Amino acid sequence: MMKIDKNTIERLAFLSQMAIPEENIDAEIKRLEQMADVIAVIREQNTDGTEIMCNPHDAHMILRDDVVTETNHREEYQKTTEFTDNGLYLVPQVIE
């Protein structure tokens, strides 16, 4: 098991730019030790023959054909404004 002490907590707090009050350090040591214990149990598990997976669900996405299913309405939409040029919308310049 990893040794977690006050210096470890203070170093982690410094690296993560967190302020941990002095009275909370003992509680944080206990929390990190519990997390280290859980990780140790997980590491002890035999995973030989287990396939690597992204998630535990064995589902496959249903893929559709890559075809256009909608018609182009650009000309209709551009009739609603006078700020177009060669099929493009004209917008005011905001960055110089």
Image: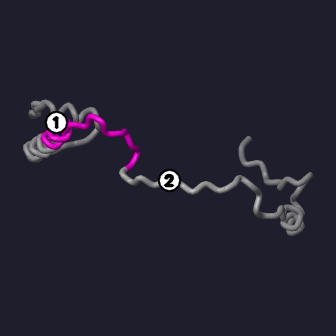
User: Which residue is disc 1 drawn over?
Assistant: 44
Classify 73 as above or below 30.
below
Which percent across, then down, holds residue 26? 7, 43
**Hey, what amino acid is under mark 2?**
His
Q: Residue drawn at (45%, 55%), measured in percent from left and top?
A: 59
On the rendered structure, is 75 left or right of 42? right
Q: What is the residue that sits farthest to the front in this orientation?
A: 49
Residue 95 magenta: no
Q: Nearer the viewer, residue 33 or 71?
A: 71
SS category of the residue bearing label 1: helix
Asked if the residue under mark 1 is in contact with the one under mark 2, i.e. CB atoms within 8 Å, the reply is no
Q: Using the image, determine if residue 20 lies above or below residue 77.
A: above
Counting from the top left corner in percent of width and height, residue 57 is at 39, 54
Q: Residue at x 16, y 36 (%)?
A: 44
Residue 67 falls left or right of residue 34: right
Spatial CA distance of label 2 from label 1 is 31 Å
Give the magenta part as a residue range. 36-55
The image's mark for residue 60 is 2
